[in-house]
Image (cartoon, rainbow, N blue to C red):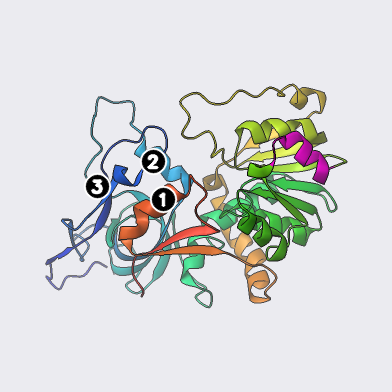
Amino acid sequence: MASDDGDDEQVSNKQVILKNYVTGSPKESDMYVSSNGTIKLNVPEGTNGVVVKNLYMSCDPYILIQMKKPDTNSSKPPVSALTGFGVAKVLDSGNPDFKKGDLVWGITGWEEYSLITDFQKMFKIQHTNVPLSYYTGILGMPGLTAYCGFHEVCYPKKGEHVFISAASGAVGQLVGQFAKLFGCYVVGSAGSKEKVDLLKNKLMFDEAFNYKEEPDLDVALKRYFSEGIDIYFENVGGKMLDAVLLNMRVHGRVAVCGMISQYNLEQPEVLHHIMSVVWKQIRIEGFLVFDYYHLYPKFLEFVLPYIKEGKITYVEDIAEGLESAPEAMVGLFSGRNVGKQVVVVAHE
């Protein structure tokens, strides 16, 4: 039940707020950190909300959707915190499924404290013998995305050849390791020598290459996939997807998780080799992780033993404090981050 001790005092609530709707690539100046917000740490009497203290925030490319101007006459965004996946601690609850002291992960605000009223994307954390920040990544939305995208969308077979773009990111690094554990040959692309070395030396990839150093992506892919690609886990789109289509095997599968190269373009790039889908009978399927939430318990059973046994590595890029959130968010689109981008809001 919600607290009834009468303590309705307002406390300061620092927030990351959208200043201007984003056109093209986001800039740090499109956001600002406000110390003017306030919140009551008690749930309003008679409601089933939950008040949480946010501990970790997840920076993800999809957040750009809420930063774009909607199809309305509004010229300025609302003065409210951005939202995204995070890890939080329950301070007060009017919901019987959550009690004070519970740790949770799910959709919350980019702020110090949040009042949660939608619990469809909120999970109670049962396993605390791993870093809590993992619930923004390997044990949260990116982990479930990697697991379901690879196993449920791609239907892999042992020994198949797998290619992953943006392979050192929050999702890609896990897809590669899941594929290796399954017995596949795995190659990833990334945007720096540091990331390529990470993929090959720490994350179990068989091969990796820096796409920025490849004048011809078709040639690069043929170098690593002389017999073609069975599974492509798509995070980039554009020229990379076009080159992949030329190199897919018959009955290849493409799981479309995202297309980060296209998000900030006014006109998306044209695919020149789309007819390969017909000639090679390629199946291309986009997917949203929300459709697979029912598999979260199964996913935990799969991944937790690998974490405890040290058979999976997860790389995080940690930024300290809400003040660092705008820079961290913008960095996603220039490839500044190495691994999963996390913002620490508070140390429990």
Residue at the far right: name it: 227
Answer with mark 2 or mark 1, whichever residue precedes in sequence: 2
Say which residue appears at 76% left-offset and 41% top-offset.
Answer: 220
Residue 267, image x, y percentages: 50, 23
Q: Is residue 88 magenta?
A: no
Question: Disc 1 marks which residue?
Answer: 329
Q: Magenta part of the protein: which range?
A: 214-225
| Quadrant location of the C terminus in the rendered image | bottom left
Numbered tag placed on residue 208 in the rendering = none
Q: Nearer the viewer, residue 91 or 239?
A: 239
Camera sees residue 274: yes
Q: Nearer the viewer, residue 241 or 285?
A: 241
Say which residue appears at 53% left-offset and 78% top-offset.
Answer: 129
Q: CA distance from mark 1 to mark 3?
A: 17 Å
The type of residue carrying mark 3 is: Ser
Answer with mark 3 or mark 2, whichever residue precedes in sequence: 2
Question: Disc 2 marks which residue?
Answer: 26
Q: Give the answer, above or below, for where 262 lies relative to 110.
A: above
Q: CA distance from mark 2 to mark 1?
A: 8 Å
Camera sees residue 49: no
Question: Disc 3 marks which residue?
Answer: 80
The type of residue carrying mark 2 is: Pro
Answer with mark 1 or mark 3, whichever residue precedes in sequence: 3
Q: Nearer the viewer, residue 268 or 93?
A: 268
Q: Is residue 56 left or right of residue 236?
A: left
Q: Is residue 200 left or right of residue 167?
A: right
Residue 258, image x, y percentages: 56, 40
Q: Is residue 219 magenta?
A: yes
The type of residue carrying mark 1 is: Met
